[in-house]
Amino acid sequence: MPAVRSSFFKAIFYLWTVLFCVLYLPLFWLPTNGLIAFQGIWSRGVRVILQVIMNIRLEIRGSKYIPTGGALIAMKHQSSFDTFVMHTVVSHPAFVMKKELLRIPLYGQFCLNTGMIPIDRDGGLRALKRLMKDAKKSINEERQLIIFPEGSRTYPGQHVEYQSGIFGIYKYTKKAVIPVALNSGTYWPKKEHLVAGGTIIFEFLEPIKSGLTKDVFMKVLENKIETASNDLINS
């Protein structure tokens, strides 16, 4: 039964997560790199659980575009899976995340200690300026900054307007942007049961060079990600 199988996976997933939160308590003193490595172990464990219970694996395409140093990555966002699996794909990810997530016990503190960047979506210009400064600092520290330009999860095939915060970071850091398309919502949709048996694909696309105007950049970014994501969903 699909619902039972999905519920069993989620139960194991949460148990695995709680275990790591408990193990994290005595590790507050570790440097950021140590905590990131610890987070990577948790993420790899989730991938194993996902494959064993749900028969879902991850495939990475466009590996030649995966950055090794400081970089700016803009990802499609369809699933909870997107928010943590990048720890198994790039070396030092730093996510731009909703400030509200910091309220989650232990998890919120872990995010702060690993250099994630919370954004107050109601904070206006002041919040945007802080975001750009934190983003530049993170990239200068050779981390891969990951932002979801849609702002929240969407359903496969659903289209929402991209938020302009990504352009602010792009302009301020003067970095090329690496778009990432995916089909994760097909197998791990928001607020629904997981669908067993399949392959979640993350496709790294050709970087968008720096220096474009806002209108051109936003149009190119959205077109690249949406077109490639729809192709993955429909293939």
Image (cartoon, rainbow, N blue to C red):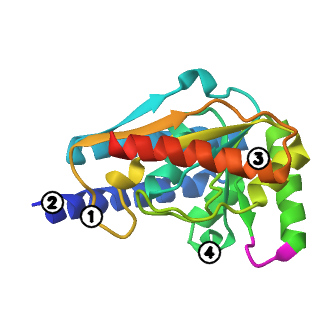
Which residue appears at 50% of the width and 58% of the height?
21
Give the residue at mark 1: 193
- Under tag 3, what secondary structure? helix
**Residue 150 shown left or right of residue 112 in the figure:** left
**Residue 147, position in %: x, y?**
67, 52
Q: Mark 1, mark 3: which one is toward the viewer?
A: 3
Secondary structure at numbered mark 2: helix
Q: Residue at x 62, y 55 (%)?
A: 148
Of the two numbered discs 1 and 2 on the same chain, state the one appearing first in sequence: 2
Quadrant of the drawing holding the N terminus: bottom left
**Which label lies toward us, 4 or 1?**
1
**Percent from the top left, x then y, of residue 5?**
17, 58
Q: In this rendering, which labeled residue sits more in front, label 2 or label 3?
A: 3
> From which residue to which does the magenta span run?
120-124
Q: Is residue 217 above or below residue 125?
A: above
Q: Do the residues labelled 2 and 3 touch (CB within 8 Å)?
A: no
Q: Position of residue 64 (x, y in %)?
A: 59, 20
Callouts 1 and 2 close, C-beta under 8 Å: yes
Q: Residues within 10 Å of mark 4 (few under 14, many from 20)?
A: few
Q: Which of marks 3 and 4 is nearer the N terminus?
A: 4
Q: For the residues marked 1 and 2, what is the alpha-carbon distance in whole angstroms? A: 8 Å
Residue denoted by label 2:
2
Viewer-proximal residue, 12 or 192?
192
Query: What kind of residue is marked 4?
Result: Arg
**Most frequent secondary structure within the magenta stretch:** loop
| Quadrant in the rendering for residue 56 | top left
Q: Mark 3 points at which residue?
A: 217
- The residue carrying mark 4 is 103
Label 1–label 3 contact, CB within 8 A: no
